[in-house]
Image (cartoon, helix red, strand yellow):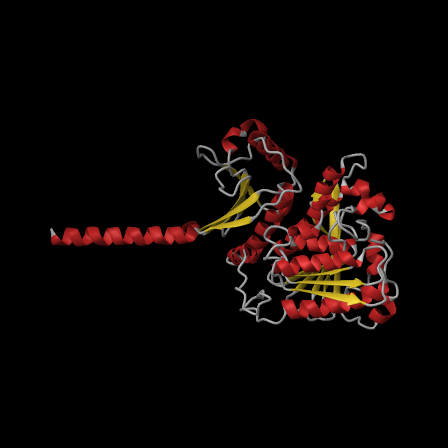
Amino acid sequence: MSRLLPFGLLPFLATLASAQTRTQDVVYMNKGGTAFTMDVLKPAKPNKAAVVFVVSGGWFSDHAMLKRYEPDIEKVFADAGFTVFEVLHGAQPKFKVAEIVEQVQTAVRFVHAHAADYGIDTNRVGVTGISTGGHLSLMIAGSPDSPVNAVVAIAPPTDLANWGKPSFLLIDDPPMAVFAPVLGIDPKAPKNDNETLVRKLSPITFVKPKYPPTLIVHGDGDKIVPLQQAQTMDQALAKAGVEHKLEVIPDCGHDEKTFGPGLKKALQWFKDKLLKYSSKEGCRRHRPNGTRGLRMTNAETQLASFFAKYEPAIAKLGKALRAKLRDRLPGLFEIVYVYENQDSLVISYSPTENGYEGLCGISVYPSCVKLFFGQGARLSKSDPSKLLQGSGKTVRHVVLNTVADFDRAEIQALMAAALKLAKLRLDASAKGSVIIRAEAQKQRAEQRKQRDRSSTRRKAKARR
């Protein structure tokens, strides 16, 4: 988990440079007065696939580290046509690992939400990182409704409760005791309590059959992160029936002798898992027993198709406002409704997947985007400017003409009042999901029933 970076790679990788476009300091999240950013590297000839590269060492991440990785390392991917999202997370000691995981999760959500802007296919997103960047990549891969389709972790910590041997916590290793604060561990607390805590921060805990295809690269001479971490994770993936591979680099440690080959192996893994199927077919996941996997059809892909039906300016505004609400309301479910008879797309934010307790959301129409409040009729005292519109019993809305409108003090006051009224306490570590309600199908079925009833009445009337 060293913060040392692989300078030895630079001469080799410098030869890979080509014409690419870099967008610096793209904000993917604002929280507590802090802007979290990424750089986006667009290749000269994009292949519609994306690689999220988590810049991290010892759960530390900053622009100096990013500059030392750049300009060459990520060009391994960009020269092959991958759009690269270089994610910086909040650094320890200010931020704990649980918070950092949520930050990276939000970054990947941002990539999905802005897929059309960057010309990528959300079924072709890979995530990778070195050392703790690999740990964070594996944590994202194991999250509910995993937003990535392949993962490569180079020299990653994977099981913090069994560090090198069973029942030996990471912090029991003297050089690693310095990470107790960032893990949220109290060294004086009972070992069982600390073990429970670190399991929640260990990728191995979240391995499941739907885990994306995973490559782990590790040096057999690594003195910082034991090879055992890669081996036990590999065994867990095999037990769950996940497509996986462990590449052990002989006579190499936690340094550029492992990192360099690891990046080249990562490139090949992403080519194999993200590029070998046509865009119409989508990426498929394969089971180790050789049977063909099911086509991936995720909610994000469906939602992207709904947005695509609107004019580009409206779709872009809707997606940007959605990203704002996801940042503002972490952990809430996104319930999506499509009302064909009104040409509207509704995304409601709810603490449960039922959707009945919808706090607020956006309604996208051909000519505008509205921010609505489920209990807007009760927010009049928080609306001195009389922004809220509507005459229904409960719901009120505000038309937002730009993304900046959402950040206005009056709008944020309404958001705060709605949260207070709902008595919700947001948990940045909680995981929500996107749920598509087949409202359009229900409407078509109801329309058919109405046509059948009308036809029956007409026939009955004719007989009379």
Residue found 76% across the figure and 63% down from its top: 217
95, 457: nearer the viewer: 95
Q: From the viewer's perspective, is residue 162 above or below residue 329?
A: below
Residue found 87% across the figure and 70% down from its top: 11
**Residue 233 on image: x %, y %:** 70, 57
**Left/right of residue 316 with respect to residue 66 in the rendered view:** left
Residue 359 occupies quadrant? top right
Q: How many marks?
A: 0
**Residue 55 visible to an observer of this rendering:** no
Which residue lies most toward the left here? Answer: 464
**Residue 188 visible to an observer of this rendering:** yes
Residue found 72% across the figure and 68% down from its top: 267
**Left/right of residue 36 with respect to residue 426 in the rendered view:** right
301, 310: nearer the viewer: 301
**Residue 328 on image: x %, y %:** 64, 41
**Residue 34 on image: x %, y %:** 75, 42
Q: From the viewer's perspective, is residue 317 above or below residue 182?
A: below
Which residue lies most toward the top here? Answer: 381
106, 396: nearer the viewer: 106
**Residue 250 on image: x %, y %:** 82, 68
326, 210: nearer the viewer: 210
Q: From the viewer's perspective, is residue 76 above or below residue 330?
A: below
Residue 382 occupies quadrant? top right
**Left/right of residue 119 with respect to residue 339 in the rendered view:** right
**Left/right of residue 179 with respect to residue 450 in the rendered view:** right
